[in-house]
Image (cartoon, rainbow, N blue to C red):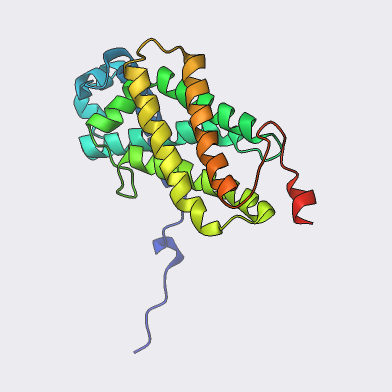
Amino acid sequence: MSPSPVDPADVAVPDGRAARWTGQQQRRRAEFVEAALVAIKQHGPDVSTEQIAAEAGVARTRLYRHFAGAHALNEAIAARAESMILEALAPVWDVSVSPREIIRTAVTTHLGWLTENQHLYLYLVRHSVATAAGDNAVNDVKRLISLLLIRLLDEYVEAVGLDARVTQPLSFGLVGFVDAAAARWVSDPGGLSLEEMVDLLATSIWSVLDGVLREVGLEIDPTVPLDLGATSA
């Protein structure tokens, strides 16, 4: 028996309402996440869900109509924090400027973000908030920054002939060092000003890089941009 013909009237035709509803949900979720960031800044890393809901101007139960529990909300907060850090650091990775300028700009930007968002950083650490990928949010951010640094170092490696195998452990080591030192300084400056801390970290980073380069007989002036095009030609 041949199948009955399909009546066009029985076929669901998208009218745009589902798409509009999805877009509205996404916008509302984004608004709640922004409200959470404000609440964290005001109340500290131990902010409650009730305080976040109050900042958003809704009841706690209304908040969870858009998030499947506290974990989903925290996951969204972690994703937003991750994008904030990477947005702040994105302009730093410019190989057309000198190594010293790249390092100082990166350190200054990182310290500035931590100073401005100390409660958010501590919130991510204390709650062990995970990203959608399942990694701890702070570790995930450090991994992404390390990958950016690897990309930057790879360009120098190709230009100066350094062993490419060193870039990954070197990048992760430097990012871990800066993150730990910066987080400690933000919570307890110990009398060091921002400028002094930038000088300390930037000098330390270059000392490590310079030591690696000298091991293979390379001496690079950190104040002079490396002409990658001319070097690799």
Q: Quadrant of the N terminus?
A: bottom left
Q: Quadrant of the C terminus?
A: bottom right
- Specify whether residue 5 is in view: yes
On the rendered structure, is 128 left or right of 146? left
* Residue 101 horizontal/vertical position (percent): 63, 29
- Specify whether residue 19 is in view: no
The one nearer the camera, 37 or 207, is 207
Q: Residue at x 26, y 16 (%)?
A: 54
* Residue 72 horizontal/vertical position (percent): 27, 39
Quadrant position of residue 23: top left
Q: Residue at x 72, y 34 (%)?
A: 224
Position above or below: 165 against 130: below
Q: Residue at x 39, y 32 (%)?
A: 179
The one nearer the camera, 136 or 15, is 136
* Residue 7 horizontal/vertical position (percent): 42, 68
* Residue 154 horizontal/vertical position (percent): 59, 52
Quadrant position of residue 29: top left
Quadrant position of residue 128: top left
